[in-house]
Structures are given as C-alpha cells and as structure tokens.
Image (cartoon, helix red, strand yellow):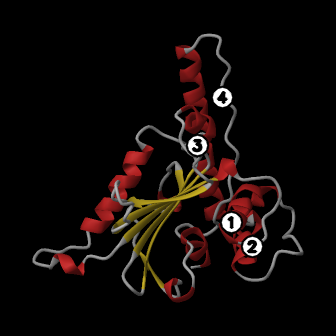
Amino acid sequence: MRLLNDLLDRRGDRAIEAIEYLPSEQLPIVEGWKLSILDVRCRERSGTTFVVEMQLLHVAGFMNRVVYNACKAYVGQLKRGDPYATLSDVVAISICDFILWPDAEQEDAKLPRIPMLSRWNMTEQASGNRGLLQVQYAFLELPKLPEGRPETGAALWAWLFVHAPELTEIPSDLPPGPYRDAVELANEATFTSLELDAYQRVMDEIQQAREYGEAKEARVKPGARSRPKLRRSWHSSKPGGS
C-alpha cells in the first residue's frame, strides 16, 4: 500500500488503506520462467484495480502489452448483463530496469524530459481536461535514478530497487516500516531453496535473453560494440508478493 501511495501520490482522503490481492494472469515464479520478475494484481476498497509489474528487459511490443493488459483488466470486470456503471478504474504500474523515454530523444524532438516517475491518462488536447481517468498508467524508469539516497517517497523505492542487491546489511538510518520491510524481504538468505532456485532460473533466462539480443545486434551492425548490461534490480523474495 505504501508503494502504491508513493508511486501514485495518493494522500489524505485518496490514500489507499486496504487492498485485496487478485489472481495473477501470469504463472508464479516457481511454476515457470518469465522476463518480468514480479506480477501483482490487487484492488483497493473503492474498487480501483492495480496491475503492478517489474520488467527487466525492454522487449518488442512492451508498451503495447502494458496497454493491452490494462484495458483487458478494465473490460474483464464486466460480466454478461452487468451495467457499464459497475466498471471501476484500472491503474497499470510498470517498474522498468531500462529507459523508455531517453532524455536525448526528448530534447531532439524539442519535447520536455519525461521524469523517472511518470503518470499518464487520457487528456483533452485543447483544454487539458483530465476527464477520462478510467485507465491510467505509471512508469518508474530505474536508470533515471539521481545520485544520492532520497529520504522518502517514490525516489526512495527506486533507490531500494536498484541498490538492495549491493547491501550487506540494512542501512541503520533506514526508518522502520515499509522501506525496511522491503529490504528484509529482498534478502536472499531468507529464501527457501525452492524460491532461490526459481529466482536463479529466471535470472539465468534473462541473462540468456540479453546475450541473444547483443549477439543479434552485433550481427546486424558488424563492428558495433555490444550494449552494456542492464543493472540488476531489487527483487521480491515472495513470488506474487509485494
């Protein structure tokens, strides 16, 4: 709940105070390999559904898949004979270990830079009215993390996702609560043998996909240097958990 509130800037009366976990459409990590290390669907008391995933590779069609899954979650609420008024909002949250909107490309196109945490919805172009909020999106681009450790909020979550694998102990000045709890969950020493084996198999598949992509790029562009490996990101020890 704290992660969702920080990423979506939900405060006061809009803060998420209770959530219900929903079955994930993707197989759990212990039952199969995938390039998305975390996939969670949950719903708050008002009915809004959150589709949260951590994506480690920028595969072809990624953005289309995000939109498709969000819209599928929206229309999937409606059963035969149900009125449209029963539909509730859907928010798709993607935590990405790659850059979706490079600063250089934005500047070349004379467009504003997209921040590390960006939130998207349908807006009327002339007036700027943000009236169509039924399906919304949020993207956290981890490589855009600035230097230094933030104090709180979405930036601190990003810092934890990026740097938790490097920590040998929980920082003493990390306040009790969700941030500290998240680091404790990321401790591989607490994994069961099944979880550790499943996690390693997923990471091996991701590394193979990276190497395949680099080799393919090298064949297309003879003499070109391969792209640097993406940083390994923070992970959850409990498949399907938060």
Q: Secondary structure at mark 1?
A: helix
The answer to whether the residue labelled 3 contacts the one labelled 4, judged by CB atoms less than 8 Å apart, is: no
Q: Secondary structure at mark 3?
A: helix
| Disc number placed over residue 125 in the picture, else none | none
Q: What residue is pinned by disc 2?
A: 184
The answer to whether the residue labelled 1 contacts the one labelled 2, judged by CB atoms less than 8 Å apart, is: no
The total number of labels drawn is 4
Please state, as top left, top right, bottom left or bottom right, where the N terminus lies in the image: bottom right
From the top left corner, tell me how far across and down residue 214 is, in percent.
Answer: 60, 26
- N-terminal of the pair, mark 1 or mark 4, is 1
- N-terminal of the pair, mark 4 or mark 2, is 2
From the top left corner, tell me how far across and down residue 165 is, in percent.
Answer: 76, 57
Q: What residue is pinned by disc 1?
A: 157
- N-terminal of the pair, mark 3 or mark 4, is 3
Residue at the spot 60% in from the left edge and 44% down from the top edge? 98
Q: Nearer the viewer, mark 4 or mark 2?
A: 4
Q: Residue furthest top?
A: 222
Q: Nearer the viewer, mark 1 or mark 2?
A: 1
Q: Nearer the viewer, mark 3 or mark 1?
A: 1
| Disc number placed over residue 206 in the picture, else none | 3
Residue at the spot 87% in from the left edge and 62% down from the top edge? 168
Distance (Cα) linking label 4 and label 2: 32 Å
The three-letter code of the residue at mark 3 reads: Ile
Q: Secondary structure at mark 4?
A: loop
